């Protein structure tokens, strides 16, 4: 048995129970491919959504889940990843995604206390996680686990946000220094915080913990 994998099997098993106590539906996948299969073969058939939308997530795109969902029959897919349409249309798609049956995304961090912690640029992702879509699926890699809320906030501001600013080629101080400067840049991507302590209603948010490092 691989010791690192075994360690995380134990750790994620403990975290799964904590999140279940907080009202989440929880799953553990051994890797990215298993997480994709879990969503396609178990969660979607169970929920039977007529419409599916997405929040910004490298994990969802790189896993191939997004492309596979677009191929599903009898499901309306609201494509919020397409950068070709004019900005007004892209914003309208994000607005429509708030009324979808299923919203799929990731999280910036999760804690040993059973919280999801996210920081958004425009707020559409965290808005949908809080209210609107009938169900939410959050796919999150083990690398985003933090001891508590303070550690999660620090992870987001000092690592996830600067790396994402670099990826998006934003003209922000953190994209140059690698450190949050609490800037006033027009390219700032850190505008709306959301801390989800419990799933309300119970079972609305489905969290897939992946025993693999995924995303930022």
Image (cartoon, helix red, strand yellow):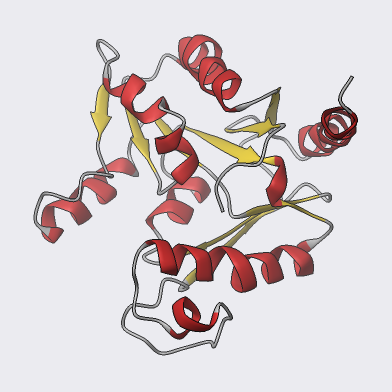
- Does residue 107 appear in the picture of this structure? yes
As drawn, 36 above or below 72: below
Report the front residue among 17 and 180: 180
Find residue 160 and report its horizontal and vertical position in percent: 57, 63
In the visual, does 71 lie left or right of 112? left
Q: Residue 30 vs residue 190: left or right?
A: right
Residue 101 visible somewhere in the drawing: no
Q: What residue lies at 65% left-to-right and 40% top-to-bottom?
A: 141
Expressed as whole percent of the image width and height from the top left, the position of residue 46 reads 52, 11
Compared with 128, 118 (above or below) is below
In this view of the protein, which residue sits in the foreground, 41 or 179?
179
Q: Is residue 79 left or right of residue 108?
A: left
Q: Does residue 151 appear to the left or right of 88 in the view shown?
A: right
Give x and y (percent) for residue 18: 84, 38
Residue reaching furthest front? 2
Identify the residue at image location x=43%, y=69%.
165
Residue at 36% across / 86% down in the picture?
A: 185
Q: How many marks?
A: 0
Q: Residue furthest left?
A: 86
Quadrant in the rendering for residue 194: bottom right
Which residue: 36% across, 65% down?
A: 122
Quarter holding the C terminus?
bottom right
User: In which quadrant of the rendered view does residue 98 lie?
Assistant: top left
Viewport quadrant of the N terminus:
top right
Position of residue 87 measured from the top left corner of the image (x, y, whole percent)? 14, 60
């Amino acid at each position: 048995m691989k010791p690192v994998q075994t360690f995380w099997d134990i750790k994620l098993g403990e975290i799964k129970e904590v999140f279940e106590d907080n009202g989440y539906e929880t799953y553990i996948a051994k890797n990215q491919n298993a997480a994709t299969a879990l969503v396609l073969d178990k969660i979607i058939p169970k929920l039977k959504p007529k419409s599916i939308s997405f929040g910004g997530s490298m994990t969802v795109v790189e896993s191939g889940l997004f492309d596979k969902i677009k191929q599903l029959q009898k499901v309306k897919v609201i494509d919020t990843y397409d950068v070709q349409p004019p900005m007004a249309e892209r914003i309208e798609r994000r607005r429509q995604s708030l009324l979808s049956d299923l919203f799929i995304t990731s999280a910036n961090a999760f804690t040993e206390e059973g919280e999801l912690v996210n920081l958004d640029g425009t707020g559409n992702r965290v808005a949908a996680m809080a209210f609107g879509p009938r169900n939410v699926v959050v796919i999150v890699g083990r690398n985003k686990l933090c001891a508590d809320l303070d550690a999660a906030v620090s992870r987001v501001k000092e690592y996830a946000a600067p790396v994402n600013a670099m990826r998006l080629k934003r003209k922000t101080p953190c994209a140059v220094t690698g450190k949050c400067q609490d800037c006033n840049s027009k390219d700032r991507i850190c505008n709306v915080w959301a801390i989800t302590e419990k799933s309300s209603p119970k079972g609305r948010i489905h969290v897939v913990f992946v025993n693999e490092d995924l995303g930022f």
